[in-house]
Each structure stands twice: as C-alpha cells, then as structure tokens.
Image: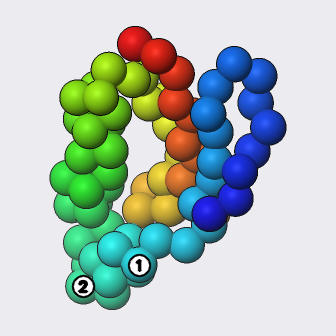
C-alpha cells in the first residue's frame, strides 16, 4: 500500500492483492472483482464515505486506486 497525494481526498494505491492472486489462480478473477472489490464500495458507504476507484488488480490493472471522500 502506498499513500498518494491527491488534493481533497484520502488516497492510496494497493500494489498487490492476495485475494486477486488467489482468485485469478483459480480462474475466478471476474468473481473477485464483482464480489470482493464491490465490498470496498459498500463498506465506504456504510461509513458515510464515497470511494472512487477506477482500477483494480482483479480487473487486470497494476494497482487498486482507492480515493475516499466524504459522502
């Protein structure tokens, strides 16, 4: 995990995801993205935050970009 300097948001990038690696090894990368990655969005909303993420490792990107703002 690496903090990223983005004005007005709490931002970090995840460079390695063990869940994505595990699921990809079993041919389930799409399931990982649809279920596991979606949980991040739901948990942020539950805390009253908004998570904007354009890339995920499960989706084939080299990172997961987490960008949190207030709701």
Classify 46 as above or below 65.
above
Density class for disc 2 (Cα within 10 Å; few <14, some 14-19, many ≥20) is few
Density class for disc 1 (Cα within 10 Å; few <14, some 14-19, many ≥20) is few
Q: Which residue is mark 1?
A: 18
Q: Quadrant of residue 1?
A: bottom right
Residue, x 54% and y 53% (percent of image)? Answer: 64
Q: Is residue 56 left or right of residue 49?
A: right
Classify 39 as above or below 9.
below
Query: Residue extending furthest bottom?
Result: 25
Q: Is residue 54 left or right of residue 71?
A: right
Q: Is residue 11 left or right of residue 19?
A: right
Classify 55 as above or below 46.
below
Q: Where does the image place residue 17, in percent across and percent down from the top left?
A: 46, 71
Q: Quadrant of residue 6?
A: top right
Q: Which residue is mark 2?
A: 26
Q: Where does the image place residue 14, in percent across and percent down from the top left?
A: 58, 60
Classify 68 as above or below 8.
below
Q: Quadrant of residue 11?
A: top right
Secondary structure at badge 2 equals: loop
Secondary structure at badge 1 equals: helix
Residue, x 63% and y 48% (percent of image)? Answer: 12
* Camera-nearest residue between 21 and 14: 14
Q: Where does the image place residue 52, in percent across and percent down from the top left?
A: 49, 29
The quarter of the rendered structure image containing the C terminus is top left
Q: Earlier in the sequence, mark 2 or mark 1?
A: 1
* Camera-nearest residue between 6 and 60: 6
Please state which of the two labelled residues, at mark 2 or mark 1, is closer to the viewer: 1
């Amino acid at each position: 995990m690496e903090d990223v300097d983005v004005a007005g948001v709490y931002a970090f990038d995840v460079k390695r995801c063990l869940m994505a690696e595990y699921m990809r090894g079993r041919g389930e990368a799409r399931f990982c993205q649809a279920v596991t990655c979606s949980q991040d969005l739901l948990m942020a909303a539950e805390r009253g935050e908004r998570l904007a993420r354009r890339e995920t490792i499960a989706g084939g990107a080299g990172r997961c970009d987490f960008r949190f703002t207030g709701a």
